[in-house]
Amino acid sequence: MFEHHLAKYKEIKRNRSAVENWNREKEQHLKLATSHASQCRIWDSNNRGTEQKRLRNERRQEAIKRLSASGWGPEELRHMEFYYHRLFELSKPITERTWNNLEPQLVRVLRRLKYRRLEKERCYSLKSRYKLLKIAYENKKYGNRLTIYPPLSDLILDGILGSIDDTIWNTPLEQKLTISVFIDALHDAAAEIAEFSLKWIKQNSLDLTKLLRRSGLDGDYDLRTTIFSCKYCGEKTWVPRIFMHDCYYL
Ligand SMILES: [Zn+2]
């Protein structure tokens, strides 16, 4: 090819315009050839990309089929973290020999995902049970306006509702607990709640007295006959009901 071009050049080299025309023609050829070569490269890489994608997907589907047969469910097998795991990035088909190495690695991922899912479900279930307990307690509180009920959180933290706590934590998650379970449990714990309530009122009265003294109210007064007024909602209240005031303005 080179000899051919050299011979052609020698033939026309004395004719300047012929050389210029020849150069332009060759430049044009080169442009066309370069553009064609680059299109070929793009086509080749696209084709190879699609093929690799197909092989990777086959690898993933084969793994899912095998793991599904060993009992894994769609919650984990369709999870994004599993589905797009780097172990499926190889575009190689699964053989019995490679499966022996791949399976334990994939199972480790699935176990982690399952543990996370169960923890979430457990947390959700415990939260719903505590919500039911709260509703049962609020109903009891509003159904009996003569008794003082400490906040539910104080009762739980002080261990007064130990048996209810046990029911919440230790009843299997598959077993649904209804609100009546909590209404009955609170009814059974009535004596303990009342006993705690007395202690709670006493402690809060002491704290309130300290607060009044700090505010400069040093005079001789009896908390039981003092009327308080909420500065936010204006409600008139007294000890011990004041400790239950849950201001809707705050
Ligand atoms: Zn108020």
Image: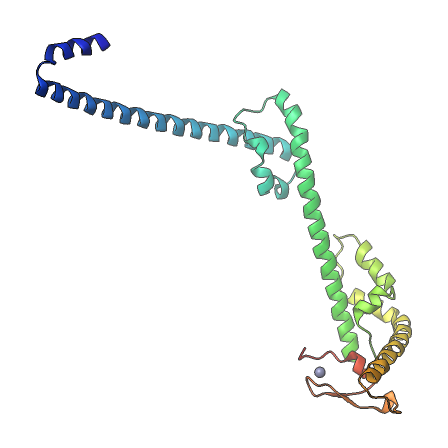
Q: Split into 4 quadrants, where in the image is the C terminus?
A: bottom right
Q: Split into 4 quadrants, where in the image is the N terminus?
A: top left
Where residue 201 sits, quadrant-wise, is bottom right
Q: Position of residue 81 (x, y in %)?
A: 60, 41
The one of 33 and 117 positioned closer to us in this rendering = 33
Q: Relative to residue 25, is residue 234 depicted above or below?
A: below
Q: Position of residue 23 (x, y in %)?
A: 16, 21
Name which residue lies at 8% across and 21% down. Answer: 17
Q: In the drawing, does residue 41 fall left or right of residue 156?
A: left
Q: Is residue 107 visible?
A: yes
Name which residue lies at 70% across and 88% down. Answer: 234
Where residue 86 sits, quadrant-wise, is top right
Q: In the drawing, does residue 193 fall left or right of residue 43?
A: right
Q: Position of residue 127 (x, y in %)?
A: 72, 60
The one of 233 and 180 positioned closer to us in this rendering = 233
The one of 233 and 68 positioned closer to us in this rendering = 233
Name which residue lies at 85% across and 71% down. Answer: 187
The one of 15 and 213 positioned closer to us in this rendering = 15
Q: How is the image coloured?
A: rainbow
Q: Relative to residue 60, is residue 235 depicted above or below?
A: below
